[in-house]
Amino acid sequence: MRILYAATGEIAVPLLRALAERQLVAAVLTAPDAPGKRGKTLLPSPVKKAALELGLEVYQPETLRKEAREYVRSIAPDALMSFCYGKIFGPMFLSLFPRTFNVHPSLLPKYRGCAPLYAAIRNLDRVSGITLQEIAEGVDEGRIYSTVEFSLDGTEDNLTLERRAAELAPKLVVPVVENIGEYPVRDQQGEASYTSFVKKEDGRIDFSASAASVHALIRASYPWPKACCMLDGSPFYITGVYGSAFDPVEKAEEKPGTVTAFVKGKGLKIATGDGYIYASRVLPPMKKEMDAAAYVNGSKGIIGRVLE
């Protein structure tokens, strides 16, 4: 099987390497180079960087219209495989492929759309997974080849969960591609739910919510958009939290948002609507991200303050 591998994000790199090792990649379709966080220098996507290291052909169209379709015809792949690509495939483009695959980091039909990892953490799920499906015209509505599921322990943040999904993707996908006749597609079963793009404001902390909910928001929002509250009218980010969201919590008596203490080995003890969370890492105004101990050493007046 010769696959056109359509992907952009870091999550898709291990699978690209696994497919390339088996000489299954005809070419790589990825997003055009984009400006970095600082400056105007155009930077390649993580998938492009890996593809060039592997000696693979890379194609970066702005759109998937006529020119892109002509390119696909010129290389005549047997299949299209998408994983965190970032563009919608229209019916004319999809019609060029005898077979299509999409890797989606949720147990479909749960969390269709672009932010399944954020949703799984934010909603305090105990189980997550990855699905390999056909590509359909509707968002993540295609029939399923195979899934793999795993448990969540309430400590994962978006970055660590992405890495876990990335590591598991080759184990899910490669057996299907190499033994396609043993994996007949099946319809999705159960109630569908959808996710949308995560916005900066989605990281805003409401300390009147439960400790578990605040804990989950902090983890789901890292590394972006980072969970944020206000201190003296300036944004104060909490980038790490101690323990598991599933742990029992001590009942809080103080006003939600009150920094009640610094606990060595845990962090800043902050009251929420029903208990406490421990902020292990913070990003204060005009400073770099640091652990809570370093912050307290330089900001001893934080104890007793109320984060809003």
Image: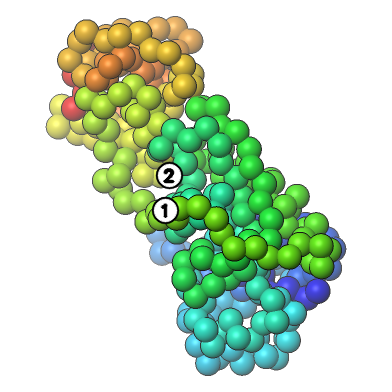
| Left or right: 96 as drawn, with respect to 214 | right
So how many labels did they put on this image?
A: 2
Q: Amino acid at mark 1?
A: Ser
Q: Are marks 1 and 2 in contact (CB under 8 Å)?
A: yes
- Residue 258 to residue 26: above or below: above
| Residue 12 spot, x, y in % from top left | 63, 57
- Mark 1 and mark 2 lie on one chain; the one further toward the N terminus is 2
Q: Quadrant of the N terminus?
A: bottom right
| Left or right: 215 as drawn, with respect to 273 | right
Disc 2 is placed on an element classified as: helix
Along the viewing direction, whichever of 300 and 263 lies nearer the viewer: 263
**What's the residue at 69%, 56% (across, down)?**
146
**What's the residue at 82%, 67% (across, down)?**
181
Regarding residue 31, the answer to whether it shows in the image is yes
Q: Which numbered tag is attached to residue 193?
A: 1
- Residue 205 to residue 86: above or below: above
Residue 134 quadrant? bottom right
Determine the CA span between mark 1 and mark 2: 10 Å
- Residue 217 to residue 7: above or below: above
| Residue 295 spot, x, y in % from top left | 36, 19
**What's the residue at 68%, 61% (across, down)?**
145
**Residue that mark 2 sits on:** 119
Q: Quadrant of the C terminus?
A: top left
| Residue 54 spot, x, y in % from top left | 76, 64
Residue 269 quadrant? top left
| Left or right: 169 as drawn, with respect to 273 | right
Q: Amino acid at mark 2?
A: Ala
